[in-house]
Amino acid sequence: MSESGLKDRITDSLDRPMRAIGLSGRDLIPVLSGFGCNVVAVFQSRACSQCTRKSCVSLIAFGSACSYQIGGALSVFGSAGHPGLFLPYIFVLGLVGALHTKVWNRAQDRLDVQTYQSLSYLQKPTMRAVSWRLRTVIKQFLLQAMPIFIVICLVAAGLQLTGLMSWLSAAARPLLQLLHLPSEAASGIIFSIIRKDGLLMLNQGEGELLQSMQAGQIFLLVYLASTFTACLVTLWTVRKEMGGSFAAALAGKQMITSLVSSVVIMLVAIYV
């Protein structure tokens, strides 16, 4: 997309809608990259302006479903016999993510985000340019993102072996009961905080738990597990890039938005 000029054409045309939530068209590229990997997207947010980078990272953490999260959600919905829930799930994720960014970054709305002249062009990309871009992305993933993934996997294994995972699951059960969700799903919530494909824990027992739940409950469970906080890999990267206080604030704000929106989804599922 970069070599053909298509990326510039898209960002130029979507600049005005993105400003409605305090971002510019250029900030759309890291957000879209987040659907592949949130960690790489956070690194790419370096290209954002100083005025909008925090808002962009906030939207990435909440609304950009990474490939692990998408795969896990598709698997859970499929095991539950409700694959059609995936598209509404992505829509709600994007909608609430936009509202989340708008609400928590209102101060940045008053900042004068620098406009840019449209220089969009289209051309046929060359194999040399595409291969160079591909090598750069792969190198970035292998040397920056992959080591963090490995460390997080070791941490998850340690929590499981020491029994701390069982304690954390027990601590999450009151929240699930408040949202009218089965307490047996707590482990899926905890593992999804560590890694977004932790959603796959909900498939244990050949999906017996999922098949006993209603469609609204399944939707709410996957949404809550996906949005309660960014995964530890993403938060670690945000801490390295923007500081520990911002990472902690990001996680706290996302938890609040996730819980409030989950209550709204629960009420809709009950009364509609």
Image (spheres, rainbow, N blue to C red):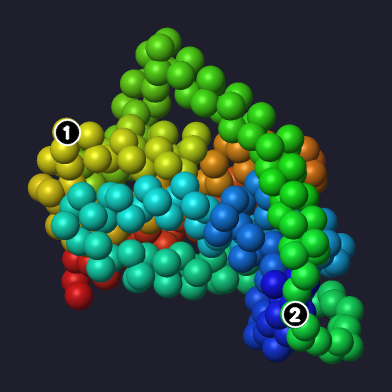
Q: Quadrant of residue 110?
A: bottom right
Q: Position of residue 234 (x, y in %)?
A: 63, 43
Q: Residues within 10 Å of mark 1 (few under 14, many from 20)?
A: few
> Which structural element holds mark 2?
loop
Please identify the residue farthest to the front as the structure is shown.
Answer: 127
Q: Left or right: where does residue 163 sit relative to residue 214?
A: right
Q: Left or right: where does residue 9 sit relative to residue 171?
A: right
Give the residue displayed 18% in from the left and 47% down from the top.
210
The answer to whether one can see residue 62 in this image is no
Q: Position of residue 117 (x, y in %)?
A: 89, 88
Q: What type is the residue that disc 2 sits on?
A: Lys
Q: Which residue is mark 2?
A: 124
Give the residue displayed 59% in from the left and 51% down from the top.
37
* Labels 2, 1: front one: 2
Q: Which residue is mark 1?
A: 205
Looking at marks 2 and 1 on the same chain, the residue that comes earlier in the sequence is marked by 2
251, 91: nearer the viewer: 91
Q: Residues within 10 Å of mark 2 (few under 14, many from 20)?
A: few
Q: Position of residue 272 (x, y in %)?
A: 20, 75
Q: Quadrant of residue 192?
A: top left
Q: What type is the residue that disc 1 sits on?
A: Gly
Q: Left or right: where does residue 42 sit relative to residue 209?
A: right
Give the residue displayed 22% in from the left and 34% down from the top.
204
The answer to whether one can see residue 162 in this image is yes
Q: Quadrant of the N terminus?
A: bottom right
Q: Position of residue 38 (x, y in %)?
A: 61, 51
Q: From this view, report whether residue 171 is shown above or below residue 227.
A: above
Q: From this view, report whether residue 155 is shown above or below residue 193.
A: above
